[in-house]
Image (cartoon, rainbow, N blue to C red):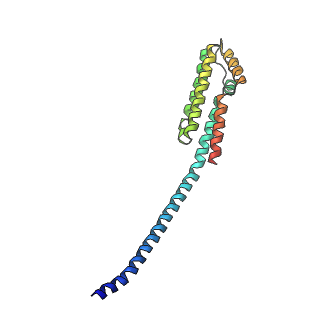
């Protein structure tokens, strides 16, 4: 009886070891296959989303160019000599451009979005400050142009940041 048990163990033990080895190898193979498929899917998603992200960065760069105070003052003429009317027109134009591009925040990094919002706020704040000391709409234009001829507009910083972000993407 003991011989039968030992004989059974002699047959069962190699089969069990072989079974465990096969299970371990197949399990590792399946896990590796799943990992490779996940990586392929991530690469495919990234490849598909890259053009959308690049387009969003392009639009935000264009937004920065459009709200650049020097370029904006050349593009938007005063409607009257009233300083406040012109200031409100400039601010409304900035806000309209911003709202037009608001959805782009989905596709760009949080840091880039923060830089763009900070740029918008800095320009509006500067326009308001200059408007307080200006006597007319044309005076406001001149004072803003003089002020920004001495310092770099905040849009240049945002544009540099956007370009840096795009370099990381591609």
Residue 77 versus residue 48 in the image, above or below:
above
User: Can you see residue 122?
Assistant: yes
Q: Residue furthest front?
A: 2
Question: What is the tally of numbered marks visible in this picture?
Answer: 0
Quarter of the view holding residue 136: top right
Most foreground residue, 74 or 28? 28
Residue 82 in view: no
Quadrant holding the N terminus: bottom left
Taking 27 as reference, is 71 left or right?
right
Q: Where is residue 100 drawn, in percent x and y?
A: 56, 34
Q: Is residue 103 above or below residue 148?
A: below
Residue lying at the far left of the rendered structure: 1
Task: Tell me if 21 is positioned left or right of 84 in this view.
Answer: left
Given the current orientation, which residue lies at the most extreme top position?
Answer: 135
Front residue of 167/26: it is 26
The structure residue drawn at horizontal position 65% and vertical position 35%, both measured from the top left corner, is 159
* Residue 42 image position (x, y, % from top left): 53, 55
Q: Residue at the spot x=57%, y=31% of the render?
A: 117
Q: Identify the residue at horizontal 58%, vertical 46% (top origin).
A: 52
Residue 144, how many percent across, how many down?
68, 20
Q: Residue 170 placed where, x, y %?
A: 64, 48
Name the foreground residue: 110 vs 26: 26
Is 40 drawn above or below residue 73 in the view shown? below
> Which of the 4 image quarters holds residue 116?
top right
The residue lying at 62 percent from left, 47 percent from top is 169
């Amino acid at each position: 009886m003991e011989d039968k048990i030992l004989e059974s163990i002699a047959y069962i033990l190699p089969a069990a070891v072989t079974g465990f080895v096969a299970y371990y190898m197949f399990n590792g193979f399946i896990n590796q296959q799943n990992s490779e498929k996940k990586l392929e899917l991530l690469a495919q998603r990234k490849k598909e989303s890259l053009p959308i992200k690049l387009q969003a960065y392009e639009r935000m760069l264009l937004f920065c160019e459009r709200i650049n105070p020097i370029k904006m003052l050349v593009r938007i003429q005063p409607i009257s000599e009233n300083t406040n009317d012109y200031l409100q027109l400039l601010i409304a134009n900035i806000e309209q451009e911003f709202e037009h591009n608001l959805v782009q925040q989905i596709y760009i990094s949080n840091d880039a979005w923060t830089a763009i919002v900070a740029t918008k706020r800095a320009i509006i704040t500067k326009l308001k400050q200059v408007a307080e000391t200006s006597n007319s709409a044309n005076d406001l234009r001149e004072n803003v142009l003089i002020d920004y001829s001495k310092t770099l507009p905040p849009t240049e910083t945002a544009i540099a940041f956007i370009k840096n972000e795009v370099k990381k993407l591609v």
